[in-house]
Amino acid sequence: MPPFRRLLGLLRPEAGELWLVLLFAVCVGALTLATPVVAMAVVNTVALGTLIQQLVVLCVALFVALSLAAGLMILQTVVVEFVQRRVFVRVAAELAYRLPRVDLKAFDRQNGPELVNRFFDVLTVQKASATLLLDGITLALQVLIGLLLLSFYHRYLLGFDLILIGSLAFLFLVLGRGAVRSAVRESVAKYKVAGWMEEVARHPVAFKTAGGPSLAAARTDALTREYLEARAAHFRVLMRQIGFALFLQVVANVALLAIGGALVIRGELTLGELVAAEIVVTLVVATFTKIGKQLEAFYDLLAAVDKLGYLLDLPLEEDGAEAGGGAAGGGAAVVVRDVSFAYDHQRKMALTRLSLAVAAGERVALVGPNGAGKSTLADLLFALRTPDRGWIELDGADVRTLRLETLREQVALVKGVEVIEGTVLENVRVGRAHVTHADARDALGRVGLLETVLALPGGLDTVLWTGGSPLSLGQANRLMVARAIVGRPRLLVLDEALDHMDSDIRETVLPAVLGPGADWTLVVVTHSDEVARLCDRVVQLDRPSGEVPHGNA
Ligand SMILES: Nc1ncnc2c1ncn2[C@@H]1O[C@H](COP(=O)(O)OP(=O)(O)OP(=O)(O)O)[C@@H](O)[C@H]1O
């Protein structure tokens, strides 16, 4: 979507306030023009040698007009402040809604956390929109009203106005061509630098290996250069416009003095009118010097909105409509029917026409070589991805038709370690209000982690950091199992979650997932013969040989 349309979309809910800002600006613009009007009256009355009282009345009138303008400007600032706050809250709320629902596909070829950096563009939107709403509109209106006023003095000045308006149109439309594109390119380059910095910070071991620092420096150098080129290209457009605006300022000032002076000499303009016209033109052309700042704010705003739009446009998972569910407790029967799946942009199939039936309460080990598609199947069971063909049933219900929220109350997946910055309790609960403190303690106990957690300074309220610290990796792994079993799922899918545990620990955890109280259906992806042996059945997956029929772009 073009950035300008996106901007309108973002500001639409604020339409009421924006009209108010515009109204204030019109009033302020009109009121500030009281200065030239009063000046003209003063010059004319002084020239005619009238009374001091008239001067006092004029000054009082000017004071009232300018005070009113100042009051309106304060109101305008307050309204713009509220608009800014609301834009921040709206974008934050929308992202909080969308991010957990983003289709995993979107993150296959892009770094999710790096994409989220674009949220900071809300600040650019806030700052730039405030600049434009407060100064930009007022300046534009001052120019407009000023030119209108000027045209009343003499028809020559109307011609002067028209030439000035034509020049301004040339400045914005012709000289500004390509500015939005160059602003967007600049901001893309900026994010690449930030993304790379994050990459370096995220992989401390890799970048501490012998060549790590030089790789960090070399790539930063290349990306910074890319940024500088993009910035320079954008600056060229800006300078073109700023230079022309300043040139226009000089020409307009001189031209008015020349035209006005000639008209006064010819008696077609009074001295007062010339002074007033001169003040108006000074006001109008003074705005030209500020055009650079306004233009930069405008292009930054469009680039920021473009970036935010990118984040807000990430595709969401397709949700089913059925509440579904089958039996309330116990294991769920799972059927995988003729399922094929290929990742986007891959030539090889990840799964080809796989069929599998798992009875309710059955424990199945999925084994096979690297790349056989085991993790892909685990993802499909949790509906992180959708089969390209075939389907999956849970207790006879097609998973695609179920509401994802309901489905994920019934299916739990343990895949890698995802510790959220928050307390141990929050990490076990993950927003599920029905999970009590006692439930969390019970789940932690079952995976042999309760004593370790209670020994931490804050017990279950100890704050964990992303990555799991102060827990060890193995302990964090068990925390993930506790998170999965605390919701008493009907299908538990463990993607190599047991493989990383030492045999003692595994013995503690195994009863929790395979023992008598564990009445769920279990699918364990494993490379361990020991784990496989404990299951009711072992299903071997082999690397699919199929190619994606017509590419998978
Ligand atoms: N995000 C992805 N994008 C593109 N291709 C992927 C992605 N994830 C996996 N693949 C490909 O899909 C195929 C199956 O991968 P999958 O991770 O399911 O295998 P696996 O059996 O779990 O392997 P392992 O035992 O190594 O964990 C592999 O060929 C892999 O290269």
Image (tube, helix red, strand yellow):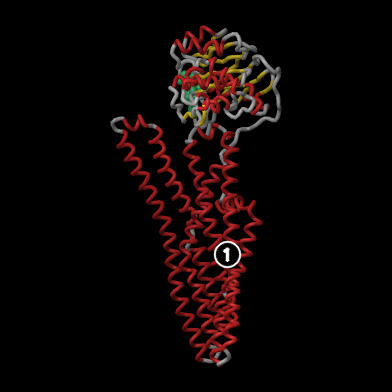
Q: Picture coordinates of residue 362 (x, y %)?
A: 61, 10
Task: Tell me what residue is drawn at x 51 percent, y 55 percent.
Answer: 128
Q: Which amino acid is tagged 1?
A: Met
Residue 340 falls in image quadrant: top right
Q: Picture coordinates of residue 249 (x, y %)?
A: 46, 73
Q: How many marks?
A: 1
Secondary-structure class at tag 1? helix
Task: Tell me what residue is drawn at x 56 percent, y 78 percent.
Answer: 150
Q: Quick check: 339 above or below 133?
A: above
Along the viewing direction, whichever of 546 and 490 lies nearer the viewer: 490
Task: Tell me what residue is drawn at x 58 percent, y 91 percent.
Answer: 50
**Is residue 488 in view from this perspective?**
yes
Q: Give neighbour class at mark 1: few <14, some 14-19, many 20+ (Cα, 10 Å).
A: many
Q: Picture coordinates of residue 490 (x, y %)?
A: 63, 17
Q: Residue furthest front?
A: 457
Q: Quick check: 157 above or below 216?
A: below
Q: Residue furthest left?
A: 210
Task: Tell me what residue is drawn at x 54 percent, y 27 percent.
Answer: 427
**Pointer 1 residue:** 73
